[in-house]
Image: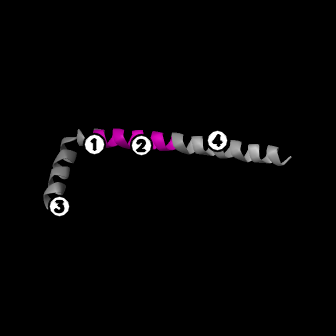
Amino acid sequence: MGFNLTFHLSYKFRLLFLLTLCLTVVGWATSNYFVGAIQEIPKAKEFMANFHKTL
């Protein structure tokens, strides 16, 4: 009985870990895409240049 409970919790933990990993990868890829897309916009390039000058 104890073994089945441990296995069940382990299964849920692995499922949660896998879901978290997938969401992290999707979020990272999406943010990289949007950062790349924003940098292609001329006004965004100008804004970023001005921002870096002030720093």
Q: Which residue is mark 3?
A: 55
Q: Residue 18 falls in which quadrant of the image?
A: top right
Task: Please check the rendered image and state whether residue 47 is part of the magenta-colored stretch, yes or no.
Answer: no
Residue 2 image position (x, y, % from top left): 83, 49
Q: Is residue 20 left or right of residue 1?
A: left
Q: Secondary structure at mark 2?
A: helix
Q: Which residue is mark 2?
A: 28
Task: Please check the rendered image and state whether residue 25 is part of the magenta-colored stretch, yes or no.
Answer: yes
Q: Secondary structure at mark 4?
A: helix
Q: Main secondary structure of the magenta part?
A: helix
Q: Earlier in the sequence, mark 2 or mark 4?
A: 4
Q: Amino acid at mark 2?
A: Trp
Mark linked to residue 15: 4
Dot 3: few (<14), some (14–19), or many (≥20) neighbours within 10 Å? few
Q: Amino acid at mark 3?
A: Leu
Separation of residues labelled 2 and 1 (CA atoms) = 15 Å
Work out whether residue 1 or residue 26 is closer to the camera in this orientation and state it. 1
Q: Which residue is mark 1?
A: 38
Foreground mark, 1 or 4?
4
Residue at image coords 55%, 45%: 20
Residue lying furthest left: 53
Extent of the magenta region: 23-36
Q: Is residue 7 left or right of residue 19?
A: right
Separation of residues labelled 1 and 4 (CA atoms) = 34 Å
Residue 54 image position (x, y, % from top left): 15, 61
Q: Amino acid at mark 4?
A: Leu
Separation of residues labelled 3 and 4 (CA atoms) = 44 Å
Separation of residues labelled 2 and 4 (CA atoms) = 20 Å
Foreground mark, 2 or 1?
2
